[in-house]
Image (spheres, rainbow, N blue to C red):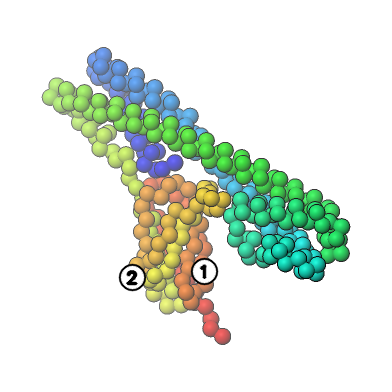
Amino acid sequence: MKSTTINFYRALNNIIRFIKSSPDIQSYPAAKTILSNMVANSAAIAPIYEELQQDSSYLQDKVNLLVKNISKNGYPIGKAVESYAIDRKDPFLAKRIHTNYTQINRAGCNATYNYGKMIEVEALRLLEQLKSYRIDEQMLVDYGNDLTELKRTLAELDDFQQNRKHKNMQLEQYLKQSRTYIEQVDVFMETFRMQQPELYKMYIAIRKEKENINGITQIKVYDSETGEPVREAKVAIISTTRMENGKPLTVVERKTGKNGELRISELDYDIYDVMVTKIGCKATAAKLVVSDNSHIKLEIKLERLQLS
């Protein structure tokens, strides 16, 4: 959930508490009506808010483990099928099954499943012949079980993400209504400007508490040897809890400026992997945790590759 949404929800409840604490305001029927609407909206938002705090990391961790197993175990099975096809002079099958570990490992989750299923189908068809290539039935059973579990987990993850999308749409409707109600309170409170200036000032103080005080994330990249800033380093900020097209969601991908610095605002509350790369340097990873609106400063040192 976006930090702006969280802060607005808190601001809404602050205004509700303020109105409830003032008998003078509640003595007006119009104020009671607005308050009733705001309370109802806050109550509707609460369970959505709680549900959106949940993450799918346990499902994504499971998907990642299954993909790793399928990549690892599918490689020798696929190579055995390919070797059999080459020995039998079947270039069509050999080409169709051909792959390598890096290609499997880089495939998205759905691509890994589809590729893995193709290997399984061919391997089961050629099981007797593949025994001479050190592939046995139990290997294929275990491999098939991982494929089945991956498909089931991907479907569960998709359901989770679709439900989250639906909840976000619901939340946006309630927030839109709440903004209208707050505007109505603003207009209504103008009647107290002259009658009860102190009460009016108290309300204005609450309203001036910014609904969105976005923290700035500052990433600075240094040369590990010289300590000098590294410009034009590629920085990718990748969510560890959200997926897109079967892969972890990359929320930011930019290069550092002349001072080796990158500044980002409005990052959602999340745990991120930060990957920094530059030609001639070793790729470097770091963790970034955004849990509130505090200013975050992350310093990363790049190590130069040693030329032989």
Which is more toward the observer, 35 or 165? 165
Q: Residue at x 52, y 72 (%)?
A: 282
Please state if 78 lies on the left or on the right of 166 as rendered. Answer: right
Please state if 252 lies on the left or on the right of 213 as rendered. Answer: right
Vertical relation: 212 (above or below) 132 = above
Image quadrant where one finds the N terminus: top left
Q: Amino acid at mark 2?
A: Lys
Q: Amino acid at mark 1?
A: Ala
Residue at mark 1: 283
Q: Report which quarter residue 75 is drawn in.
A: bottom right
Residue at mark 2: 258
| Residue 82 seen from this side | yes
Q: Position of residue 123 (x, y in %)?
A: 78, 56
Tell which residue pokes out farthest to the bottom in this image: 308
Q: Earlier in the sequence, mark 1 or mark 2?
A: 2
Which is more toward the observer, 147 or 58? 147
Assign a secondary structure to mark 1.
loop
